[in-house]
Amino acid sequence: MSQQLTERLLDDEGFTRFVDAVQDVKRISGLTHTYYRYPARFSPVFARAAIEAFTDVGDVVLDPFMGGATTLVEASSLGRIAIGVDVSELSCFLARVKTKGLSQSQIIEVRRWVDETLVSLNVRKVVSRPKEWIDKGYQRNLNSSETWPIRKLVEIALSQIALLNNIDSQEFVRAVILRTAQWALDCKRSIPSTNEFRTKLKNFLEEMILGSVAYRESLGRSKKSNVLILNGSAAELGRLTRGKKYGAPKLILTSPPYPGVHVLYHRWQVMGRRETPAPFWIANAQDGSGLSYYSFGDRKAPGLNTYFEQAKSTFKAIADVASEETLIVQLIAFSEFESQLPRYLHTMEEAGLREVREFNVDTEDGRLWRTVPNRKWYAQQTAAPRASKEVVLFHRKPVR
């Protein structure tokens, strides 16, 4: 381990701040973090503490499983170069919107848009149906007597996006519609009224404007974020980053798919466990395929062999873009951590990474563990309580 990294990890005050941040369980807030409730996202407090502890201004921070783009928002707001990779087009859409602060003229434009659109949000209004999206199944489970009014309002709102001339403004209001629809439909036992939907749309727009302004101000005088967003598999990092001007990342901060844990990265659950890919339709993004497309394979596969094979190849690609100075910090949970954690650590070794343990943590195994309340996924068989425990793992390439 480099002397600089050793000093960072062993600095009592700095590392204590990081440990405290790992245990943070406050509601997600700040900057643009509330734009969307992405499954298994980690705390911005944790991300910020890690970035401040292990990088300096101008360093490259990479998240190869960027999800809701928490790492990118925090890294760019702290003056770092932020690179995010995700196989999901929905993730890339969110990352784009969350890392572009609106200008004052754009704020005026989107406020005018919502005022004009609210007048049109009436289920009796005739609007062209999105036939292509419907034919591909993106409105699945949105046509019941409870859900169709919300679906209709979303269709009307989306049809009004063309009134905006600026692409950033269009994507911002699309994100507002997405957030409002998620609030109305995802994991709801009862669907709100159309009046409630209209009120929330207006309120969310104002909240998101405040977040956008705060993010833009965090960027300093330039008002420009140094962010690179790549759509593709982390296993293809070498190809995706080839020819880019950035060097090896100083920090890789991420949360990879959890072995044996069912996380709906690509669906909402409507009226129980009826799944819908509607978020992709609203975001104007294409869905991939089944759950295994986003999670290293079927969690029910015998022995999770596919998961660990994919984890090995993916982290080998991650190791290839890292240097010996790169610190890799992962936040991960397991459905059966007693058996899966040792196998996961062995997989990291096979990928060319060794665990960093040169600091004192007052836990039974010397690792940082945290319990996360209110998880909205289901672990394999009876392991759900264990899936709410996450561990922070530190890795780096061995010094040759």
Image (cartoon, rainbow, N blue to C red):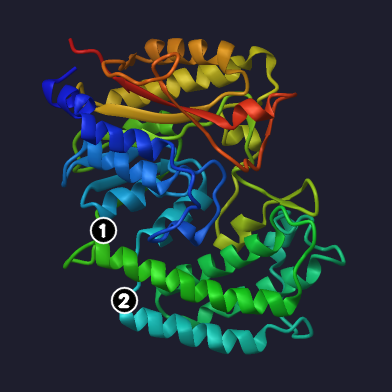
Q: Quick one: label 1, few (<14), some, or many (20+) residues within 10 Å?
A: many
**Circle 2: element type:** loop
Q: From the image, tell me which residue sits under label 2.
A: 103
Mark nearer the N terminus (2 vs 1): 2
Q: Determine which residue is flagged by label 1.
A: 225
Percent x, y for residue 355? 34, 15
Which of 7/238 is in front?
7
Give the residue drawn at x 33%, y 14%.
352
Q: Is residue 149 visible?
A: yes
Q: Amino acid at mark 2?
A: Ser
Answer left or right for 52 relative to 338.
Answer: left
Q: Amino acid at mark 1?
A: Ser
Q: Quadrant of residue 128?
A: bottom right
Outermost residue, left side: 3
Q: CA distance from mark 2 to mark 1?
A: 13 Å
Residue 196 image position (x, y, % from top left): 69, 76
**Residue 35: percent from left, percent from top:** 49, 61
| Image position of 326 (left or right of 389) | left
Residue 186 vs residue 239: left or right?
A: right
Residue drawn at the location 48% of the way across and 76% of the way down: 206
Q: Label 1's element?
A: loop
Q: Position of residue 57 (x, y in %)?
A: 16, 46
